Amino acid sequence: MSTLHNDHWSQHNHGLSRPMAWIGVVLLAVLVALGLARWSGLDPRTPDAAVQWQRALQFSDLPNGDIAVLDADTQKRVARFSGEQGFLRSTLRALARERHREKIGPEAPLLLMGRTDGRLTLLDPTTQQRIDLESFGPSNAAVFAGLRLAGHDTPIR
């Protein structure tokens, strides 16, 4: 009886090992293909749509903890953010961290760019770091989208 049980067990294991081996081969092939694509410099991202509009903005911390937003061209305050503002603060902190790492001061403005496909990008021209704001959802992107026309009496086209 134990021989019958062992024969059944070995047939059962042998039946499972063949599909598992094929899965392993396929996974290995995918990893090799990805490695070759990365090594060859292939960029999997879709190209950026053309810039439809852009605005140079400077962000600064105020003594009371608020964030002031200045139009870099006119040096006029166009917005002020109070309270937690988690997404705004974390986005600006990420860009400031890279500037600090490269020993660049906060003086240079950031570029807020709207693209023809509706996407919104925040770019730091001094470090070339960028944040594609739509990746974080429409409500988070809307925080920055409101800065396009902030402080203007007439709409910008």
Image (cartoon, rainbow, N blue to C red):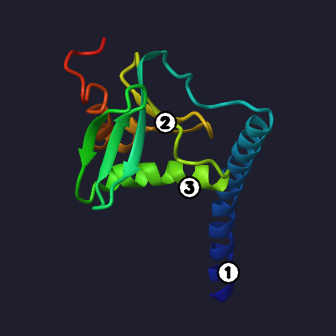
| Labelled pair 2, 1 in contact (Cβ < 8 Å) | no
Residue 135 left/right relative to 96:
left
Q: Earlier in the sequence, mark 3 or mark 1?
A: 1
Q: Is residue 53 toward the left or the right of residue 38 in the image? A: left
Residue receiving disc 3: 97
Q: Quadrant of residue 121?
A: top left
Q: Earlier in the sequence, mark 2 or mark 1?
A: 1
Q: Could you give the CA–CA distance between mark 3 and mark 1, rounded to whole angstroms?
A: 63 Å
Q: Nearer the viewer, mark 2 or mark 1?
A: 2
In the image, what residue type sits under mark 2?
Pro
Q: Quadrant of residue 64 in the image? A: bottom left
- The reply to whether dot 3 and dot 1 touch (C-beta < 8 Å) is no
Quadrant of the snapshot with the N terminus:
bottom right
Can residue 113 be seen here? The reply is: no
Look at label 1 and name its amino acid: Asn
Compared across the picture, whether 152 is left or right of 1 comes to left
Tag of residue 109: 2
Q: Distance from label 2 to label 1 (Cα)?
A: 74 Å
Spot occupied by residue 60 in the image (x, y as percentages of width and height) = 40, 49
Q: Nearer the viewer, mark 3 or mark 1?
A: 3
Query: Dot 3: what SS?
Result: helix
Counting residues from the start of the chain, the first of labels 3 and 2 encountered is 3
- For disc 3, the neighbor class at 10 Å (few under 14, some 14 to 19, many from 20) is few
Relative to 10, say whether 105 is above or below. Answer: above
Q: Residue at x 69, y 56 (%)?
A: 18
Q: Which residue is mark 1?
A: 6
Q: Are marks 3 and 2 in contact (CB under 8 Å)?
A: no
Q: Name which residue type carries label 3.
A: Arg
Few, some or many residues within 10 Å of mark 1 (<14, 14–19, 20+): few
User: Picture coordinates of residue 133 (x, y %)?
Assistant: 40, 38
Q: Residue at x 37, y 26 (%)?
A: 74
